[in-house]
Amino acid sequence: MRLCITEPVNEEGVTRLMEYVIISGVLLVLMIVMMFTINAVFMEGPADKLRYHAFVDIGNGVSTRIVDLYVIAPGSGTIATKFDIPDDVAGRGYFVNVGMTGASQVIQVQGGNVQSTVAIAGIGATKGVSGSTTGAGWNMIQYDSSGF
């Protein structure tokens, strides 16, 4: 007669280790997903909104300077003015383009995927305005009665 005695197997240690590994893995995946979501929703969205409104303000400021120069422009001769606009908005540079769009003259301020368009108020299409600049350094508006 053979006697077989089996000792109970204690698998509790392995079970707890597997539980720890699985829960840690799931939490790590959720943390990675949250990092991408937080960057897009809580950082890029408000920064783009801030940049848009700053671009509208910059466009209005450039429009005002153009109209002011037009008001004091001589009948014959040349006049120039220098002005400064912010070097960057929300840590990024931008471009300012002035020109015709259809029948109206507009100022487009663009940086990255954010763009604003502002109409040049007051002078309409009486004087042709064109040019471009960036936010860096001093900017200049020139008027010559004979044209450029």
Image (cartoon, rainbow, N blue to C red):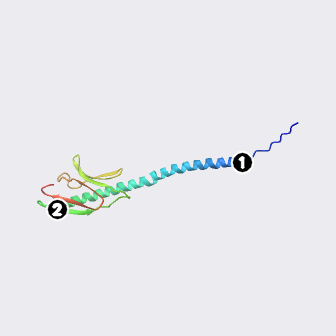
**Residue 28, horizontal then vertical, whole percent:** 56, 50
Please, what is the three-letter code of the amino acid marked with disc 1? Glu
**Residue 121, horizontal then vertical, whole percent:** 24, 55
Q: Nearer the viewer, mark 2 or mark 1?
A: 1
Q: Secondary structure at mark 2?
A: strand
**Residue plotted at (48% across, 50% down):** 36
User: Extreme left residue here?
Assistant: 76
**Residue 93, horizontal then vertical, whole percent:** 34, 56
Whether 1 is drawn above or below 63: the answer is above
**Residue plotted at (57% across, 50% down):** 27
User: Considering the image in quadrants, where does the N terminus appear?
Assistant: top right
Compute the Cα span from label 2 to label 1. Answer: 88 Å
Please, what is the three-letter code of the amino acid marked with disc 2? Ile
The foreground one among 61 and 77 is 77
Q: Which residue has dot 1 on it?
A: 12
10 Å crowding of disc 2: few (<14), some (14-19), many (20+) = some
**Residue 145, horizontal then vertical, whole percent:** 13, 57
Disc number at residue 120?
none
The foreground one among 46 and 97 is 97
User: Extreme top residue here?
Assistant: 1
Q: Secondary structure at mark 1?
A: helix
| Visible residue check, residue 77 | yes
117 left or right of 73?
A: right
User: Considering the image in quadrants, where does the C terminus appear?
Assistant: bottom left
**Residue plotted at (45% across, 51% down):** 40
74 left or right of 22?
A: left
- Counting residues from the start of the chain, the first of labels 2 and 1 encountered is 1
49 left or right of 98?
A: right
Q: Which residue has dot 2 on it?
A: 79
